[in-house]
């Protein structure tokens, strides 16, 4: 009997695949780098065919030591707001996918924000703010700028979707065009209460409803593999979740007040609010966490657009390090008392929550003749942690009279002990890091496994979930306060530009 879940995690800079067994062990892992392109300032794109080719290559690598016959189900998790358009019958893309980081619709979002009452309506309906981060204005841009696409979308021969929908369409031989509630909630087009496409939002952005995927629960059989060659026909694709919701589920943050922060290209803090829709008063988003076993959970989320990407910036743009893994040792060489006023605001693709300033640019402030590369390395880690601490503070305000008691972390950059210790110090909270850091893939895999009966219940998963390390806050309050004041001053400068 098949006992493995193949979990596909299609991210901004790589596609990762895991094989997960019934004991919650990762028995195989493979990854393929798939980098976005930057056709002009502020624009970020992905080639959909390269994403598909990278997915094929990754699945083939992860199956090098296992038979596809062992796969009980396939799951998909994905970079959420990235959106593309392709032919319904052939799957051929009409244009490169527009990545979540892309700011090309900033001016359009500014126009929409100026419409009286629209910001409040969008927040109430979708839980989101009007920002180029989300898929809706990206779809509108494609409809306006790709010749013939608007007509084909009206006819239903051209279809839109986030990356999960694209992969599902390809994996099922073009038979299924669907998404789950967590991804749909990131488009700025779905009503949080009905979990359906909202007619008023569709009309606002002139997106034809028949071009959009069907919205389904996060755990359940979406379709079956067909005509792939590298996988046999008939394997159920049974779990789909946006990457951050998948990480929340993979961390088993199942109760209201449970929170996690994922450190990838960006950093994403998410807090489960249960079946209650909580609207933020402090710049956070309200989103669907998942719909599993007939129950819909919601969440508050704060998104920082740049986290691990700041380390890549030091590596690729400034040449201060040869590999991202070097930054921890380099930053550890800088003593806190040597940092002075040095601060790095990593607003390299605008500022997300709680500031929401699409046109903000990054800043390194406080350079002196004594500044060396280890100081810049530490300032980068401090900047990531300080940026996230603003999110933690916002969630604590929104949860009052309740508060966060601890935080779980995951993602590639969470392996950096110095970064996570800084985070615990700033938050004044213990931080738990699990043994499996690929919690985005894990979470979608758990959803798929539940759908096909590999695990009998959500509660049955708790016995196998394990913590690798807990980071306890240890920073003196005076130093913590000084760091936060330095950050606040730097943010004021960035926002004043």
Image: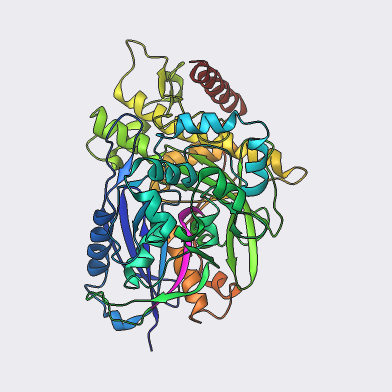
Q: Is residue 261 above or below residue 467?
A: above
Instruction: Residue 417: name its quadrant.
Output: top left
Q: Nearer the viewer, residue 91 or 369?
A: 91
Query: Does the stretch in magenta take in 242?
Result: yes
- Which residue is rendered at x = 51% and y = 35% of the image? 352
Look at the magenta stretch and give its main secondary structure: strand
- Which residue is rendered at x = 23% and y = 69% of the image? 60
**How far across and how far down the image is residue 258, in percent?**
63, 54
Identify the magenta region: 236-244
Instruction: Residue 17: name its quadrant.
Output: bottom left
Q: Nearer the viewer, residue 329 or 133?
A: 133
Position of the N terminus by quadrant: bottom left
Q: Residue furthest bottom?
A: 1
**How far across and how far down the image is residue 125, in percent?**
65, 48
Say how the picture is coloured: rainbow
Q: Nearer the viewer, residue 72 or 332?
A: 72
**How far across and how far down the image is residue 3, in percent?**
40, 82
């Amino acid at each position: 009997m098949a006992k493995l879940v193949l979990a596909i995690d299609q991210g901004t800079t790589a596609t990762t695949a895991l094989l997960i067994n019934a004991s919650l062990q990762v028995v195989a892992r493979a990854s393929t780098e798939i980098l976005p392109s930057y056709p002009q300032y502020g624009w970020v794109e992905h080639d959909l065919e390269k994403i598909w080719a990278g997915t094929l290559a990754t699945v083939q690598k992860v199956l090098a030591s296992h038979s596809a016959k062992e796969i009980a189900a396939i799951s998909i998790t994905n970079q959420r707001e990235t959106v593309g358009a392709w032919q319904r019958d052939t799957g051929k893309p009409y244009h490169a996918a527009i990545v979540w980081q892309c700011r090309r619709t900033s001016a359009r979002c500014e126009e929409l924000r100026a419409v009286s009452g629209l910001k409040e309506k969008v927040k109430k309906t979708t839980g989101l703010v009007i920002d180029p981060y989300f898929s809706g204005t990206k779809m509108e841009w494609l409809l306006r700028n790709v010749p013939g696409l608007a007509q084909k979308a009206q006819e239903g021969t051209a279809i839109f979707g986030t990356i999960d929908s694209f992969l599902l369409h390809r994996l099922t031989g073009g038979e299924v065009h669907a998404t789950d509630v967590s991804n749909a909630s990131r488009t700025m087009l779905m009503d949080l209460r009905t979990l359906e496409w909202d007619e008023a939002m569709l009309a606002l952005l002139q997106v034809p409803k028949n071009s959009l995927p069907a919205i389904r629960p996060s755990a359940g059989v979406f379709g079956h593999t067909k005509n792939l060659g590298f996988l046999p026909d008939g394997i159920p694709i049974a779990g789909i979740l946006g990457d951050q919701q998948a990480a929340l589920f993979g961390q088993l943050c199942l109760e209201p007040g449970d929170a996690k922060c994922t450190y990838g290209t960006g950093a994403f803090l998410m807090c489960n609010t249960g079946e209650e829709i909580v609207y933020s008063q402090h710049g956070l988003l309200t989103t669907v966490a998942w719909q599993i076993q007939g129950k819909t959970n919601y969440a508050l989320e704060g998104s920082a657009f740049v986290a691990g990407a700041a380390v890549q910036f030091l590596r690729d743009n400034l040449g201060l390090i040869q590999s991202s893994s070097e930054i921890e040792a380099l930053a550890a060489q800088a003593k806190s008392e040597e940092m002075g006023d040095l601060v790095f605001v990593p607003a390299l693709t605008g500022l997300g929550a709680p500031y929401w300033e699409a046109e903000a640019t990054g800043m390194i402030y406080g350079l002196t003749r004594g500044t060396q590369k280890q100081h810049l390395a530490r300032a980068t880690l401090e900047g990531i942690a300080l940026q996230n601490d603003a999110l933690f503070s916002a969630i604590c305000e929104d949860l009052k009279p309740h508060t966060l008691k601890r935080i779980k972390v995951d993602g590639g950059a969470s392996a950096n002990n110095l970064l996570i210790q800084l985070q615990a110090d700033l938050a004044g909270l213990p931080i738990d890091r699990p043994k499996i850091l690929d919690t985005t893939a894990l979470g979608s895999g758990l959803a798929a496994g539940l759908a096909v009966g590999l695990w009998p219940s959500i509660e049955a998963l708790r016995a196998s979930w394990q913590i690798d390390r807990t980071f306890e806050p240890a920073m003196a309050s005076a130093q913590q306060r000084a760091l936060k004041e330095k950050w606040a001053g730097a943010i004021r400068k960035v926002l004043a530009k």
